[in-house]
Amino acid sequence: MLKPDSAMSRLYQGKDIYGLLNSVPSPLLCEMSAAAGYDFLILDLEHLLRSEEDLMHCLRACEHAGVAAWLRVPAVDAKLIGRALDAGFEAIVLPRVESVKEVEAAIAASWFPPQGRRSITGGRGTGFGVLALQPYIERVNAEPRIIPMIESTAGLAALPAILKLRGVAMVLEGALDLALDLGLGPNPFDSQVWQALQQMADACADADVPFCANPRNPEQLQYWRARGIRSYLAGEDRGLLLNALKSRLQTLTTPTP
């Protein structure tokens, strides 16, 4: 049955939250991430081909293990957003947002009339009818669930206007794509990118909207903590797993002095 987003609820209570981008489709990995202590998982549809059955298995694993399941959609698709929220995903992540219009359309797809244009159903979200439709609608329309990712100069320029929209739950940064957009190649550490990330955080602070940082070295983490940032993306599970496996193998194969 519909419940407040567990991760966002903790954030609003003044607690830090930590998440992962899930790029290895596996319900077992969702459970492992929860066991490791993460607060939210972003299941990816932007760069992965995943079946609806796979998504539902992963969603149920997240629900069972107690980690918030967010879905990164490939584009603003009103029908997909509505179906994902009907299924039980607690937030929708929008990649490469570059206009207010995109976010407005996503918010409209996430809320029922009169605030939005989402179609109603009495499935999982209502406990298959345990929760009456009117209180269900009221609860849905009271909670922002759209999370734009800013990954380009156009998105950065549009961010102040985007943050004025009621319905934006958080903002995520995409430093790697931003570096590519700036013509810097795959270099998220470039000073221009770092300045842009700080600009994003400034805009979010001015609008009182949470900014989710993705610190890529200890210095960045120290900076974000000093700024009072309380939501963090730990990176992508695929890369973290590969590095852990390589590190373990290197330990085993390095000759003992």
Image: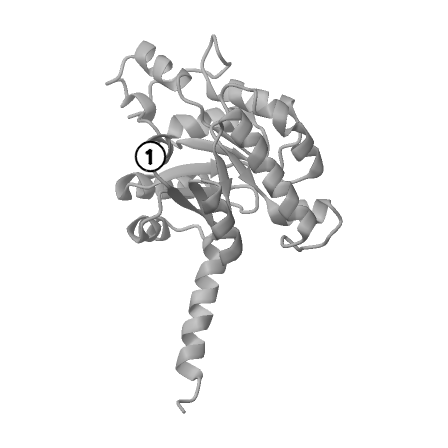
Residue ID at (39%, 81%): 252
Horizontal relation, residue 221 to residue 183: left or right = left
Q: How is the image coloured?
A: one colour
Q: Is residue 160 above or below residue 137?
A: below
Which residue is outermost to the bottom? 257
Front residue of 102/26: it is 102
Is disc 1 placed on a helix, strand or loop? helix
Which residue is outermost to the front? 226
Front residue of 174/115: it is 174
Q: How many marks?
A: 1
- Residue pointed to by mark 1: 10
Q: Is residue 82 visible?
A: yes
Front residue of 143/222: it is 222
The amino acid beneath tag 1 is Arg
Residue ID at (27%, 23%): 127
Q: Is residue 216 visible?
A: no
Residue 26, position as x, y percentages in the image: 39, 51
Which residue is outermost to the top? 114
Front residue of 71/256: it is 256
Q: Is residue 36 above or below residue 110?
A: below
Horizontal relation, residue 5 to residue 105: left or right = left
Which residue is outermost to the left? 130
Residue 27, position as x, y percentages in the image: 35, 48
Horizontal relation, residue 131 to residue 110: left or right = left
Residue 1, position as x, y percentages in the image: 28, 26
Placement of the C terminus among the 4 image quadrants: bottom left
| Crowdedness near tag 1: few (<14), some (14–19) or many (≥20) residues, C-alpha within 10 Å | few
Residue 12, position as x, y percentages in the image: 37, 30
Q: Is residue 90 above or below residue 22?
A: above
Q: Is residue 207 above or below residue 257?
A: above
